[in-house]
Image (spheres, helix red, strand yellow):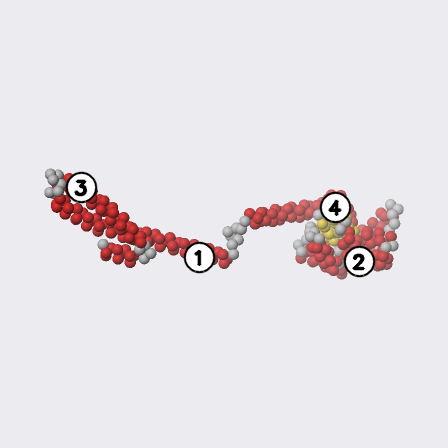
Amino acid sequence: MRLILLGPPGAGKGTQAQRLVQNHGIVQLSTGDMLRAAVAAQTPTGLIAKDIMASGGLVPDEVVVSIIADRIEQGDARNGFILDGFPRTVPQAEALDALLKKKKLKLDAVIELRVNESALLARVEKRVAEMLERGESVRADDTPEVLSKRLSNYRAQTEPLVHHYSDKRKLITIDGMMPIEGVTAEIERVLAAVTKADETTQAAKHKVATKRAAGPSKRAASPSKARKAAKGAKKAAKGTAKKAKSKRVVKKAAKKATKKVAKKAVKKGTKKVSKSSSVTRGASRKKAVKAAGNRTGRAVKAAAGRGRKAAKKVAKRPSKAAKRLTKRR
Ligand code: AMP
């Protein structure tokens, strides 16, 4: 999980960040802590930052951006991190966006702790008193004068990040005036919702990817392909209708031809019977007619065959051909 904690000095970012570390096993990356360490170690960065920090000003963007770029590269940040005190300006936020994009890392949420400014001074005074009680050294910038400068810096430079992240739909605003436990519970509740929504999105993406991998869907066909397919279907339907018409015409022509041939054959057969009464020698006229009938049947069948064949031959222009055929016979 990668988070940003946003809020003015004294809003409780450090306290909530430590709780998130415990609950989620991720690291807290506080630019304030890193800069204080650099100041203590008197590194080149520390030397640049020392006076700026003491006066309540902001350390140059390029200095803090380079610190963060190095820090998120380290192994312990691989599981995720909470950025506390960074970004503090729009250019820092843009540099972070680019950095995460380059590393293909996703920012899960930006949690803004909204607090009543008049309560902040009382909070910081309480914190200083507690630190002194524990015998800890107090921060040079934890005085009422420096705090008011840090607050005005926050309003001018850091508050615009609320819009930056709400435009990116990453912003979650929580009432930082609740007791510490209440704020923690609310952060956990919204993070659970963010995780669930993310899982749903991932599952949907996976489903789409699996479908795509399975092959092209018919619905996904391009409009030109769809038009072509429709044209093909129309053509095929026309062909089928033509064929059906041809078949009907062939049948009709064959029937007509058969009838004509059959009539002719029956006429011929009857003539033969009367002629062959002497040939059949002694056979009755009935038998002769039956024999002639059998011959006629064969003749009818043959004629039908001829009729069908001939009609099929001219099936390309069935109506004219059938007419011609009928005329001929
Ligand atoms: P913090 O502990 O976050 O309140 O930071 C203490 C001081 O460190 C600030 O008042 C700034 O002077 C400096 N600082 C920390 N983070 C940044 C940052 N992201 N950009 C500029 N200056 C910073």
SS at circle 3? helix
Percent of width and height locating residue 282: 11, 38
- Between marks 2 and 1, how big is the CA–CA gap? 66 Å
Write the residue at 55% across / 47% down. Answer: 214
Which is more foreground, mark 3 or mark 4? 3
Q: Quick check: 284 left or right of 301?
A: left
- Between marks 2 and 3, how big is the CA–CA gap? 120 Å
Marks 1 and 4, the one that precedes in the sequence: 4
Q: Closer to the camera, 161 or 217?
A: 217
- Between marks 2 and 4, how big is the CA–CA gap? 24 Å
> Where on the image, by quarter, is ligand 1?
bottom right
- The part of the image, by quadrant, that contains residue 8 is bottom right
Write the residue at 17% across / 46% down. Answer: 269
Q: Quadrant of the C terminus?
A: bottom left
Question: Which residue is identified by label 4?
Answer: 26
- Between marks 1 and 4, how big is the CA–CA gap? 60 Å
Marks 1 and 3, the one that precedes in the sequence: 1
| Disc 1 + disc 3, Cβ < 8 Å | no
Mark seen at residue 291? 3
- Ligand 1 within 8 Å of disc 2? The answer is yes
Percent of width and height locating residue 125: 83, 51
Q: Quick check: 267 left or right of 131?
A: left
Marks 2 and 4, the one that precedes in the sequence: 4
Which is more foreground, mark 1 or mark 3? 3
**Label 2 sits on what residue type?**
Val
SS at circle 1? helix
**Label 4 sits on what residue type?**
Ile
**Label 1 sits on what residue type?**
Lys
| Disc 1 + disc 4, Cβ < 8 Å | no
Mark 1: few, some, or many residues within 10 Å (few <14, many ≥20)?
Answer: few
Question: Which residue is identified by label 2?
Answer: 63
